[in-house]
Image (spheres, grey):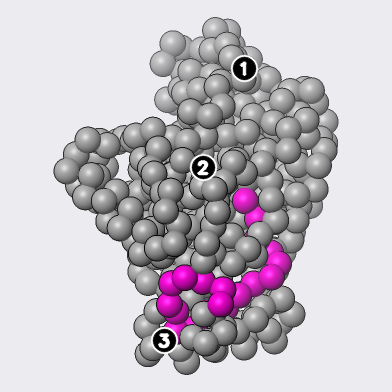
Amino acid sequence: MKLVAGDMIWTNLTKVPNKYPYLSENIECDALIIGGGVTGAIIAYYLTKEGINTVLVDKNIIGYGSTRASTAILQYEVDTDLWGLSHMIGEKQAVECFKLSEKAVYDIRDIVNTLEDNCDFQLKECLYYTSNASHIAPLKQEFDIRKKYGFDVEFLDKNSAKDMFSFSLEAGVYSKSGGALINPYKFTNALIKEAVKNGLTIYENTEINKIKCQDDHVLLGTPNDFSIKAKKVIMAAGYESKKYIKKDVVSLTRTFNLVTKPIKEFHGWHNTCIFRDDNDPYIYLRTTADNRIIIGGEDEKVGKESSKMSNLTNEDTVSIKKYDILLEKLKAFFPDIKDIEVEYKFSGLFGVTKDGLPYIGEYPQMPNTYFALAYGSNGIVNGILCGQLIKDLYLNNKRPELDLFKFGR
């Protein structure tokens, strides 16, 4: 499968800061993290802060999987809105998920403040809107339930939005807190750098192709016949982790993104807030620290690993058509921004769950193995939840919040 395709902004603007060796001997450790993307880096940060002897392996270069194709929008909102999620898992549980995500956004801010790189972190306001008049009532219900539970939101109608945005909307939920932006590649590497200071050992270009779970440890092997004996293993390898799960817990989609050259003035874009519509699939937009626009969406279901969409190139006519559609939509959103010029085009595979929530914790069929499946649009926020809950799980402090994200929920 082709995990990412095209020219990724993050790895184009930031060169590889560090190189790590591949595994060339047999080793033992307390905790082994499989996956060197942003989720694996977050978990490594949390475990090594506790002094846990931790090793991280990745079959590629650190941060060169889905992380470099992430649009890195941080929100308390998940793919399923609060009203919808409350009808799937219960109102109390849905609110708890949103509150955990909201806290995680500010936890990221606090972590960044301790790192050597600010990772282009910015707190941002967010808009969730509809352009369909028949969706006004459901969006008002969404606003009401968020307001009820203390989220800092404002309801926008067609008239109140006129002075804020150059595109028309019928209704919107405008969140004044709980949102942020970050550079995911910088964040991954800054976390790794901090974790290395705390004792993390890293092996790049090291694939794990054998896993044997025992009662008190896990034995793993590489194609070169080197072994790792770990007390606990944490699966943080994104969509590749799903091959170990017998039950179908995630579906894969390919999402497409355009990035402009820096923009001089953002006419018609109130506070350059993060925004997305209520369509399925939806369109989302954000800015960058150097005043670019990222627009993404036009998702397509992937199907089997051998399918065309699983292995789509950037030069394929499907990709070209998707990028053309995104550019047309971007110009329609902001007709008064005259200097829109595309610099990067890329697509990436991402996992989607039925309720929009990640899967975190133990999987009964694999003893001594924790899964950190930070699927969904909130991947980095979900990664924070993975790091916090798995760290506590490792320290024998099994938190009740794990029930929200467990297998078989």
Image: 288 above or below 400: above
Taking depth in this image into account, of 43 and 391 the one nearest to the observer is 43
User: Which residue does the image show at 72% across and 49% down from the upper left?
Assistant: 108
Mark 3 or 2, which is nearer the eye?
Answer: 2
* Res 50 quadrant in image: top right
Q: Residue furthest top?
A: 24
Q: Earlier in the sequence, mark 1 or mark 2?
A: 1
Mark 2 and mark 3 in contact (Cβ < 8 Å)? no
Q: Amino acid at mark 1?
A: Asn
Image: 189 above or below 74: above
Expressed as whole percent of the image width and height from the top left, the position of residue 383 reads: 61, 48
Taking depth in this image into account, of 291 and 304 the one nearest to the observer is 291
Mark 1 secondary-structure assignment: loop
Q: CA distance from mark 3 to mark 2?
A: 34 Å
Q: CA distance from mark 1 to mark 2?
A: 28 Å
Mark 2 secondary-structure assignment: loop
Q: Which residue is mark 3?
A: 135
Mark 2 and mark 1 in contact (Cβ < 8 Å)? no
Q: Is residue 99 visible?
A: yes
Check residue 148 in the rendering and tell me which mark sits there, or answer none.
Answer: none
Q: Amino acid at mark 2?
A: Pro
Q: What is the span of residues highlighted in magenta in the rendered image?
A: 163-181
Q: Earlier in the sequence, mark 3 or mark 1?
A: 1
Q: Which residue is mark 2?
A: 262
Q: Earlier in the sequence, mark 3 or mark 2?
A: 3
Mark 3 secondary-structure assignment: helix
Q: CA distance from mark 3 to mark 1?
A: 49 Å
Q: Which residue is mark 1?
A: 18
Q: Can residue 304 be found in the magenta stretch?
A: no
Expressed as whole percent of the image width and height from the top left, the position of residue 196 reads: 74, 23
* 214 relative position to 130: left or right: right
User: Which residue does the image show at 74% across and 61% down from the upper left?
Assistant: 103
